Image (tube, grey):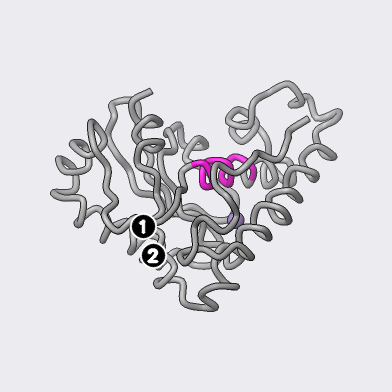
Amino acid sequence: MFQLIDLPFRENELEPVISAETIALHHGKHLATYVNNLNNLLPGSGLEELPLEEIVTKANGGIFNNAGQILNHNLYFEQLQAPRDVNCPMGALATAIEEQFGSFEAFKEKFTTAATTLFGSGWAWLASDAEGTLHILQMPNADNPATKGLKPLMTMDVWEHAYYVDYRNRRPDHIAAMWKILNWQIIEQRYIL
Ligand code: MN
């Protein structure tokens, strides 16, 4: 049985970037529903004993959609923290970003374009391959870089439920604000481990 993760922050701690109301809905309703759905679908599937990362590479249909959404949201919520005005990566990940994209600002611009132009519901990802090379991906619906053999490092949720209460249809404004609440220590750990 999969469990709903605890948030590493209080519901109001991401304000004004994300409201307590959005966090309560996003975690307590949307993510909780994916967890309940997956726990109902798994018995008899032959996938019951596998971790989420493996389920998403093997399943399709409802099991894939719900397992993917749990994996994606766990990665999303665990990489967030209270807003800070100056917020950028350090260490090996910062070096890789500078080498590949020229600068953190150039990377931000490229990732922002991926997140804002993704059509419909989905996720923008920063991922790395076996050589440590970085990739920016647009993935629809419940998809995750693990389905392409890549390691997910950082993500922005561009399903409307992630921002509609706070930003209505202004997805670009939400994406622009998200840079203040990324926990780059967590993201860096994902890169180096
Ligand atoms: Mn979501």
Q: Residue at x 61, y 58 (%)?
A: 23
Vertical arrangement, residue 112 with respect to residue 69, above or below: below
* Numbered circle sitting on residue 53: none
Whole-percent x, y for residue 22 in the image: 61, 64
In terms of secondary structure, what is the magenta stretch mainly?
helix
Q: Residue at x 41, y 64 (%)?
A: 175
Residue designated by label 1: 180
Q: Is residue 13 magenta?
A: no
- Cα–Cα span, label 2 and label 1: 6 Å
Residue designated by label 2: 177
Q: Amino acid at mark 2?
A: Ala
Quadrant holding the C terminus: top left
Whole-percent x, y for residue 80 in the image: 47, 48
Q: Amino acid at mark 1?
A: Lys
The answer to which image quadrant residue 118 occupies is: bottom left
Asked if disc 2 and disc 1 are in contact, CB closer than 8 Å, the reply is yes
| Ligand 1 location (quadrant) | bottom right
Q: Does residue 96 appear left or right of residue 48 in this picture? A: left
Which secondary structure lies at badge 1?
A: loop
Out of 11 and 37, give the one closest to the viewer: 11
> What span is colored magenta in the figure?
70-78
Vertical arrangement, residue 135 with respect to residue 42, above or below: below
Q: Residue at x 68, y 35 (%)?
A: 59
